[in-house]
Amino acid sequence: MKKRTWKIAGINFDHFHMGDLLRMAASHPQVQIVGISDEQPARMEEAVRKLRIPRDRAFADYRECLEKARPDVVILCPAASKHGEWVKKVAPAGVHLMVEKPFAASLKEADAMVKAMPRDRTLMINWPLQWVRSHRKAHDLVQSGLIGEVLNVWHFGGNRGPLWHGADKDEKTAAQVAAEKPKSWFYQKQHGGGSLLDYLGYGTTLGTWYQGGRRPLDVTAVVDRPPGLEVDEHSVVVARYAHGLSKFETRWGTFTDPWTIPPQPHCGFVIAGTEGTIRSDDYDDFITVQTRRRPKPHAVAAPAPKAPHRNPVEYLLHCLDHGEALQGPVSLPISRIGQEIVDAAVRSAATGRTVKL
């Protein structure tokens, strides 16, 4: 049976991950990129050049893009504080939506995004770490019962900073970073900037995945206050569950980027259960396991994910083709709990108090 061709458009290039997602779409055999749109046309130039997108498919007005390109699926990469605004703009076109992480700037906004979607259309929140081989293997072993009931999750997430790299992880110079910083939404509070909102959702959402969808009782958060900046570059968040404590730490300013040279501490997860522990570092091809039967830490291979779990575009189209519900961090139930924890952390950091969910 001939498989359907999916028409995809990319709208709003605030987040540089748009380039990565469009590359994944372009390499998919069932995808035709029918349009891209951004209010600042210069931001689309890299995609036009690298992916050879015809210029008549690049639009400054998203409405013209939707009307002329008529996509089935739209990838959205707006600033964190504008996710709700853009979902409300695009959802009426009757398209399926993939929104790049985080879910939203607030739980209220996240719920409004869900409400804005037509009933027969899918909203997916992409968490890139869901496709990393080490973290997928860790979840497989948690699901198998190897370490018993999960009691604690520790996550350390971050990089040198959001301006040090662009699409396809192309590195930028210190001069380029310094020039972009004053005008970048990443460093503006009103647009959802800061390391907490950028990275905390990774830990809380994948942490919820590892914990089988359980919610904490309360959350306590502390953030740094760098001189001259209105957003944080470092946060530490403790979530108290009925079964134990979990800790999530975010950092802009690691010594190296985790996809080049793993920094210290390593970016990734440690999962502790009643029968053992798992350490899963970002981008490794193995995980480290301890169990009661084999207490000495030992490496377990983490093979590359197989279709349809190699990237978010492939997975979304697989689910749409087969009428399957999204699973894992990209699903709305798991992402929403992750957002609840982020919301509580924001309030805790602002008030200096523990916040109940």
Image (cartoon, rainbow, N blue to C red):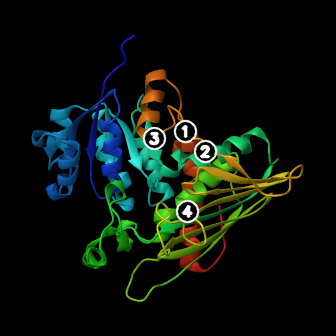
Mark 4–mark 2 distance (CA, rounded to whole Å): 22 Å
Nearest to viewer (mark 4 / mark 1):
1
| Residue at figure coordinates x 20%, y 39% from the top left | 35
Mark 4–mark 1 distance (CA, rounded to whole Å): 28 Å
Task: Please tell me how crowded label 1 is: few (under 14), some (14-19), or many (20+) other residues with Cα within 10 Å.
Answer: some
Q: Residue furthest top?
A: 1
Q: Earlier in the sequence, mark 3 or mark 2?
A: 2
Mark 3–mark 1 distance (CA, rounded to whole Å): 9 Å
Q: Considering only vertical position in the picture, is 90 above or below 245?
A: above
Q: Are marks 1 and 2 in contact (CB under 8 Å)?
A: yes
> Label 1 sits on what residue type?
Pro
Q: Secondary structure at mark 4?
A: helix
> Label 3 sits on what residue type?
Asn
Q: Which residue position holds label 4? A: 342
Mark 1–mark 2 distance (CA, rounded to whole Å): 8 Å
Nearest to viewer (mark 3 / mark 1):
1
| Residue at figure coordinates x 85%, y 53% from the top left | 274
Q: Earlier in the sequence, mark 3 or mark 4?
A: 3
Mark 3–mark 2 distance (CA, rounded to whole Å): 12 Å
Q: Is residue 328 left or right of residue 198?
A: right
Mark 3–mark 4 distance (CA, rounded to whole Å): 25 Å
Q: Considering only vertical position in the picture, is 237 above or below 325?
A: below
Q: Secondary structure at mark 3?
A: loop
Q: Is residue 48 left or right of residue 75?
A: left
| Residue at figure coordinates x 29%, y 58% from the top left | 14
> Label 4 sits on what residue type?
Val
Q: Which residue position holds label 3? A: 311
| Residue at figure coordinates x 54%, y 54% from the top left | 283
Q: Which mark is residue 136?
A: 2
Asked if residue 321 can be seen in this view, the reply is: yes
Asked if residue 213 can be seen in this view, the reply is: no
